[in-house]
Structure formats: structure tokens, C-alpha cells
Amino acid sequence: MGEIVFVGLGLYDEGGISLRGLEEVKTADKVFVELYTSLMPHFSIENFERISGKKLHMVSRKELEEENGEAILKAAETGKAVLLVPGDPLIATTHVALRIQAEKLGIKTRIVHGASIISAVIGLSSLHNYKFGKSVTIPFSEASETPYEVIAQNKKVELHTLCLLDVKAEEKRYMRIHEGLESLLKIEEKRKEKIVAMDTLVVGIARAGSTNPTVKAGFLKDLLSYDFGEPPHSIIFPGKLHFMEAEALMVLAGAPESLKEIVE
């Protein structure tokens, strides 16, 4: 039996892969890549193939989820297969399932981690990592009230909430910050629990991992019309702020001075 190496690509372009990850690609017998779990705005397959000297085989959501990654498992029966994944490879449960299946078949698996959107967004916000509660994805479907409930649960214990925004790569649809906020406001209109209101403090972040990320903190009413530029976008709903977090949001993310009045 061979092996499958899960390699993280990072967040923005082909320069985000680690040196170790690139070495794994160069020594692979076959290299697969999926680009549906997250948007990498400037990732170029052509450039990556030139840098690595390897041909990339694109795998779809159907091939990984419905067909259980059969092509990758087959390639790993007799050689080394690499699966390139945006961000950190095993943040997506799809790839955990593939790893479990491989191990059951006696195929060795390894992981080469990459920059994760979770750590990148938290770092760009300058909020304290240990004060984040459960994270959640805001879906395009407005039927789910889970994001609202997660924000409410975290606020109850004074924790921050990271909201990732839905991706439909096959349709080239990537949710933007104003869409996520509007979706939550519709739930608020129905629930009336004052969890997400026009005067709620929000942090919006766009293009984490690039050389020109946008980070803007302010009240929801102001961020609804703020131009964050191209996706991918993420949202943070801060819980109780430490004075250092408040200062960071004011200095680094343009938050209003009135933030001083609501800190510890």
C-alpha cells in the first residue's frame, strides 16, 4: 500500500503553500486538488504546475463526497497521492472521512498543515483567540437559524463569534458580508431577541491571507453599506471586549471611539 498526504494550500494564491508541502507535491506519484471548500482568489493551476513540476488533477465535491474519493484511494494503493486543499486540510469534515476510509484500507495518511482561515481572521481582527466561542457558517439558505442561535449562545457567556460565509464554488457564488448581515437581520426580525441589531458591534474581514486584506469594525448599520471589495469575506461578532481588544479595533480596524464606553 502507498499513502495519501493531505497538504494545505493556504488562503489566497499558490504562494501560500509551505516549503514542506511543496516538497511533498514534488515527490508525489499523483497530485489531486479540490477548490470547492473555499475561495482562493488568485490561485493559478498553471502557475502551480510550473512551480511544482507536477500535473494537478481536479476533484469535485461529487468525487470526494458521493464517490468517497475513489480516484485518490486507487492512486494511493501503489504509490504516493497528494490531495491539495485550501486552508488547513482537515478543517473540512469531507477530508476527515477520506482519511478514515484510507486508514481502514491500510493506506497510510499524513498531514501537512497550511494557514487556516480561522486563525488568519482571528489574527487580523486582533481579538484574543481564547475569547472565541463556537464558530458557525452563515448559509445562503435563510431557513437555518443556527448562526443566530450560535451568536446568542456565545454572547450569553461573553465570547466572540466567528461567522464563515457560504461558498457555492460550482455556481461561482461567494457570500459577502452585507448578505450575511441581512440574513441575520431577517432572523432577528422574526425572533426579536436583540441579538443582531443595527447598533450591534461587528468586525468584517475580506481576503485574509492576501497582501491587501480589508478589516473594518463598526456598528452593523454602517457595515451594511461598507465596500469590502472582492471575497472571500468573514464576519466576527465580538462578545465582551478587553480594553486592549477595543483599542486594537479602533486603531487597526477603524472602530468608532465610542467603543471605549463598552469595554471592561
Image (spheres, rainbow, N blue to C red):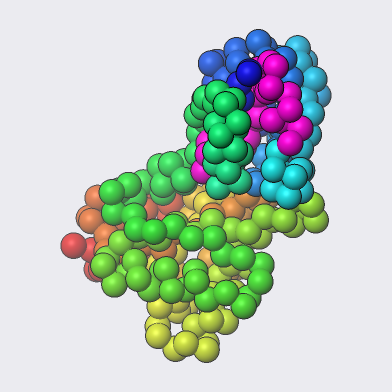
Q: Number of numbered discs present?
A: 0
128 within the magenta span: no
Instruction: Tell me where residue 263 appears, x and y as whole percent.
Output: 23, 63
Instruction: Tell me where residue 64 appears, x and y as whole percent.
Output: 70, 43
> Which residue is the extreme one toward the left?
264
The residue at the point 52 percent across, 76 percent down is 145
**Left or right: 24 in relation to 129:** right
**Left or right: 206 in relation to 252:** right
Asked if residue 184 is positioned above or below residue 32 in the image, the reply reads below
**Left or right: 80 in relation to 203:** right
Instruction: Tell me where residue 103 appears, x and y as whole percent.
Output: 55, 31
> Which residue is the extreme one toward the front?
105
Q: Give, as a single range, the part of the protein colored magenta.
A: 70-92
The residue at the point 57 percent across, 74 percent down is 144
User: In what quadrant of the picture does the N terminus appear?
Assistant: top right
Asked if residue 107 is positioned above or below residue 229 in the image, the reply reads above
Asked where in the image residue 8 lies, by quadrant, the reply is top right
User: In what quadrant of the picture does the C terminus appear?
Assistant: bottom left
| 200, 61: nearer the viewer | 61
Asked where in the image residue 138 lies, by quadrant, the reply is bottom right
| Visible residue check, residue 16 | no
| Visible residue check, residue 42 | yes
